[in-house]
Amino acid sequence: MTPLYILPVFLGNMRGWQLIIIVLVILLLFGGKKIPELMRGLGQGIQHFKKGMAEAKEELNKTLDENPTDTKGKDKE
């Protein structure tokens, strides 16, 4: 069972029939043909976000490897 502090407040008290009503409203608003397109776009957005995070992490590691913070060399000068 998922702890309640993880779920948003409005999702903590939802039951099965309430979720069904929400799904039906979404289906009515967007239609059956638009939902796969929306999910595909959401998936691509998440994929681009993960790729950007990996690139940023790689760039940060690269920068740290090129410029080590060595205080011993400064003391000798």
Image: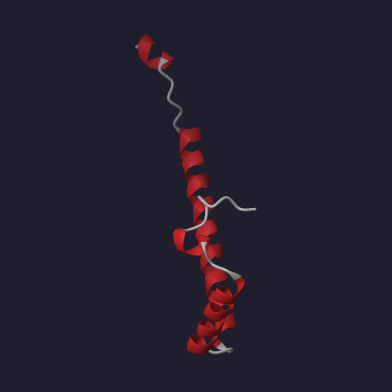
Viewer-closest of 46 and 53: 46
Extreme-right residue of the structure: 1
Tell me residue 29's x, y (percent): 48, 87
Tell me residue 56's x, y (percent): 47, 49
Q: Quadrant of residue 33?
A: bottom right
- In the picture, the quarter occupied by the C terminus is top left
Q: In this picture, is 77 found above or below 16?
A: above
Count of all numbered marks drawn on residues in the image: 0
> Which residue is painted at 51% across and 89% down in the image?
28
> Which residue is painted at 44% across and 21% down in the image?
70
Q: In this picture, is 75 found above or below 48?
A: above
Q: In this picture, is 16 found above or below 33?
A: above
> Which residue is painted at 46% across and 64% down in the image?
10
> Which residue is painted at 36% across and 16% down in the image?
74
The colour scheme applied to this rendered structure is secondary structure
Q: Quadrant of residue 32?
A: bottom right
Viewer-closest of 68 and 37: 37
Q: In this picture, is 39 found above or below 51?
A: below
Viewer-closest of 2 and 34: 2
The answer to whether residue 60 is left or right of residue 35 is: left
Extreme-left residue of the structure: 77
